[in-house]
Image (cartoon, grey):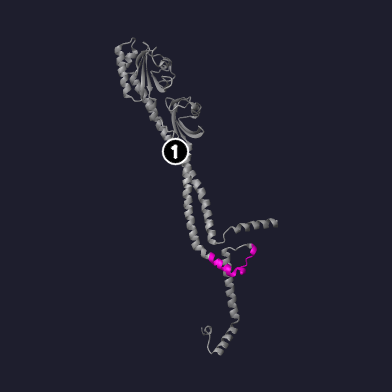
């Protein structure tokens, strides 16, 4: 037990050797350690709080943006449905679609009316007029042809099939590759056949420009998916089929957000449902760039705080040196003068300056008391010596005169 205690005391003594004796250096080093221990956790706490607040604000802005984009999409699609109904109700177009035989006059008037509607609506890329009685179709870009010669055979098959919903847009590829949103009017879920149909094809590029926010360099993606993960609007990626299906499976309710892994990176996903089409608008932001900005901000904060701490340390050193160094010099003088008499054992190591000053003052006080006591005890002898000197020299020495 004594051996362990002696080892502990020895280790403490060894550690004390590295601690400076000067009081001003001790105060300076202590305050430096205090500033460091307080400032570093404060920086990390501050950056963490800022990152959390910034993420909340980013999510808030993204929710506002996606709600705005959803409302824009709903407005444009509803507008195109209303525009298509007005176009379908045009007398010239209805007259050609209801005719049982082909007439040059009806054809010309229908093409002129359709062209007028085409030129006044920028989101309308093309339109078809279908006469199911005469089995002729008018492509407003290429003219009239029979069903057998019509260039878009797939739309003819769709027009003859019953639709499960009323006036809903769907993805259509006229040439098998180019994607367009299409609308067939009229659409009757009961499957009742009509004498004629109007097919609207929307401009995919223009819809992307007005409805979606896409910036690959900044790490933003925006697209619209169907309920099964099919890309309705936005850039198509052949390797992202499973990813789109996962997004469609996770999206539930009118709107929401979640974190999704894609391409080896984490993405923040915001989504909103577009009614009544049943599609979902997605906006994705890559978290890598956002986190890089946060790390850059934290690094700047650390550098700024380090510079501030360095400035404060310099001020503290100057102040402690100016205020406390005289005490260190006094302690050093006392050690030089009374070193052997300060009561310090060699194995204890150097004494602290405050102890040196206290012991030095106590020694000076003790010496003054003993000197005064000695003078009181030998007062008569001193007076006799002064009197003898007066008799021998014939005059008083200065202390006696005073």
Q: Which residue is mark 1?
A: 58
Closer to the camera in the image, 392 or 257? 392
Count of marks placed on residues: 1
Residue 4 seen in the figure: yes
Residue 400 magenta-highlighted: no
- Classified by dominant secondary structure, the portion drawn in magenta counts as helix
Closer to the camera in the image, 96 or 263? 263
Position of 21 relative to 280 (above/below) = below
From the top left corner, tell me how far across and down residue 149 is, in percent.
38, 13
Q: Quadrant of residue 364?
A: bottom right
Residue at left offset 44%, top offset 37%: 60
From the top left corner, tell me how far across and down residue 101 is, in percent.
33, 9
Question: Is residue 113 left or right of 270 when viewed as pictured?
Answer: left
From the top left corner, tell me how far across and down residue 36 is, in percent.
52, 52
Residue 280 seen in the figure: no
Question: Is residue 5 left or right of 180 when viewed as pictured?
Answer: right
Position of 120 relative to 160 (above/below) = below
Q: Which residues are magenta?
A: 328-347
Residue neighbourhood size for the residue with mark 1, other residues' Cα within 10 Å, grouped as few (<14), some (14–19), many (≥20): some
């Amino acid at each position: 037990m004594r051996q362990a205690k002696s080892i502990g005391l020895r280790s403490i003594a060894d550690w004390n050797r590295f601690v400076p004796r000067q009081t001003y250096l001790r105060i300076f080093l202590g305050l430096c350690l205090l500033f460091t221990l307080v400032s570093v956790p404060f920086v990390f706490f501050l950056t963490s709080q800022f990152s959390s607040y910034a993420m909340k604000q980013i999510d808030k802005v993204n929710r506002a943006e996606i709600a705005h984009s959803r409302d824009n999409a709903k407005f444009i699609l509803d507008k195109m449905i209303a525009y298509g109904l007005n176009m379908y109700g045009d007398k010239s177009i209805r007259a050609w679609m209801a005719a049982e035989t082909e007439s040059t006059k009806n054809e010309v008037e229908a093409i002129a009316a359709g062209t007028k509607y085409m030129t006044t609506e920028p989101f309308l890329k093309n339109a078809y007029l279908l006469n199911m009685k005469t089995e002729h179709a008018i492509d407003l870009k290429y003219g009239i042809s029979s069903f057998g010669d019509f260039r878009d055979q797939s739309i003819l098959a769709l027009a003859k099939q019953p639709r499960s919903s009323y006036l809903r847009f769907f993805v259509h590829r006229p040439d098998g590759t180019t994607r367009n949103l299409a609308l067939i009017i009229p659409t009757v879920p009961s499957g009742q056949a009509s004498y004629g149909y109007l097919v609207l094809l929307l401009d995919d590029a223009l819809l992307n420009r007005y409805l979606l926010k896409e910036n690959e360099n900044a790490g933003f993606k925006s697209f619209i998916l169907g309920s099964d993960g099919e890309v309705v609007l936005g850039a198509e990626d052949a390797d992202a089929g499973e990813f789109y299906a996962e997004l469609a499976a996770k999206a539930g309710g009118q709107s929401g957000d979640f974190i999704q892994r894609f391409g080896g990176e984490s993405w923040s996903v915001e989504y909103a449902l577009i009614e009544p089409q049943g599609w979902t608008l997605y906006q994705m932001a890559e978290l890598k760039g956002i986190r890089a900005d946060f790390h850059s901000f934290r690094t700047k904060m650390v550098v700024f705080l380090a510079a501030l701490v360095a400035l404060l340390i310099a001020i503290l050193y100057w102040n402690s040196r100016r205020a406390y160094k005289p005490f260190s010099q006094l302690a050093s003088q006392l050690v030089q003068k009374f070193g052997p008499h300060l009561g310090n054992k060699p194995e204890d190591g150097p004494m602290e300056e405050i102890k040196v000053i206290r012991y030095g003052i106590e020694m000076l006080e003790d010496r003054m008391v003993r000197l005064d006591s000695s003078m009181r005890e030998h007062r008569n002898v001193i007076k006799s010596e002064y009197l003898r000197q007066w008799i021998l020299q014939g005059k008083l020495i200065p202390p006696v005169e005073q």
